[in-house]
Image: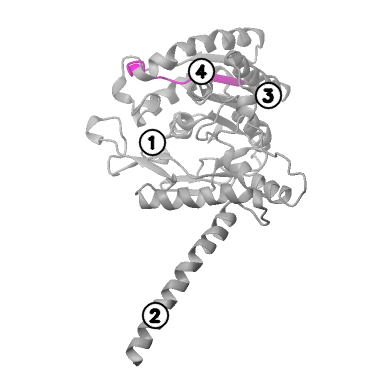
Amino acid sequence: MKHEKKIKTIFFGFVYVLSLMPILAFFWVCFRLGTTSYRPAHIPSIVFKIADTVTGSLLGNPPKRVRFPTFREIDPKLGGVENPTKDQYLVSPLSIPTPYVHYAVAPGNSSYAKHNRQQFRHPVDLEKKAPGVFRIFLLGGSVAWGSFASDDEFTITAFMQDLLSNRKTKFEVINAGNQGFTSTDERIWLINRVMEFEPDLVISLTGVNELVSHFSTKIDLMNSTHNEGAYFLEGLRMYDSYNRKLENNSEVYIDFNKEYYRPDNFPRQSIRNYEVMARYLNANKIPFFLALQPLNMKESTFCDNYCGYIDNLKPGLLKLSRELSYFHVRDLSRLFENRTDLFVDSCHFKDAGNKIVAENLIDLVSGALPK
């Protein structure tokens, strides 16, 4: 009897726990949605969320989450890699929401990439600039940041630092690149962060993210919620939670991309961003250089879609450089036209490519550098 009673207790206990699962799932989904008050109108979407999560798990298709940092293998035997000892090479660091900037790399280490507390890929924190120091900042996306560089010392900025090391003037070359940055991100990052650290010269290595953002993801550069979505997510949840308590629940999210995206925004918006940056820097007596980044012209899928648009962007930038004597442009898009061995994909290259780009950037800015 005691044995049967024990079995019944375990059985009914198990049934009781199972009966609580839908309720616990309900509150878990509500918590994930950031909801603190519930009304009947919200139940269908919550139930759908539960069903979607459960069925996805049962079918072996749980929700996918990207984990950062991300890596990819490169075969060192193919050449172009300065540090062949690694099994995988860093593609994307961890980025975090950053007020007034949208997002930027997280301070600290992302694998072997070191970021200072100002969120630059630089070995030390920046303090007030010492007398006699000349600071160069490199803006841009993942190419400027150094995706696939086999170590910090093999990024474009590190090679630039090395090329300037024998001069009388002390140079500091700061890597201010960030994954996915467009010209709008660069403009905000320049004004809200870079200018705090007394740049003497600014370079933008750009191109691909302008094209992909406009023609592939179809985002409006001036109202993008693409990469910046993570930054606004918590804010949207707070607004949503607040509005659920009101009788007249208002919409707090606008699809800005759909609202403002126009096919003819390119290249006008990109050129406008760089004009704002150039005029702002000139007002502070800081020269501004822009280089269109090298592209893999032999990768047909990418080039068929995008390479021609670089030629659409270039005339407007060159026209602007003729109008503004303090703004200088160089087209490096075909720099590696016959060196496909340097590329990892359509626009990222190995250490050897970083070194060549660094040499070209030093040549581009040489007239503005002290001896």
Residue bearing the label numbered 2: 10
Which mark is first along the chain, 2 or 4? 2
Who's the residue at 68% across and 39% down the image? 100
Q: Position of residue 91 (x, y in %)?
A: 40, 38
Q: Amino acid at mark 3?
A: Leu
- Disc 3 versus disc 4: distance between alpha carbons? 18 Å
Q: Amino acid at mark 4?
A: Leu
Which mark is first along the chain, 4 or 3? 3
Circle on res. 364? 4
The segment highlighted magenta reads 288-300
- Density class for disc 2 (Cα within 10 Å; few <14, some 14-19, many ≥20) is few
Find out whether the residues at labels 3 and 2 contact each other: C-beta distance under 8 Å.
no
Which mark is first along the chain, 1 or 2? 2
Q: Position of residue 233 (x, y in %)?
A: 61, 44
- Disc 1 versus disc 4: distance between alpha carbons? 22 Å
Discs 3/2, front: 2
> Residue 92 or 301: which is nearer the viewer?
301
Discs 2/1, front: 2
- Density class for disc 1 (Cα within 10 Å; few <14, some 14-19, many ≥20) is many
> Residue 356 or 36: which is nearer the viewer?
36
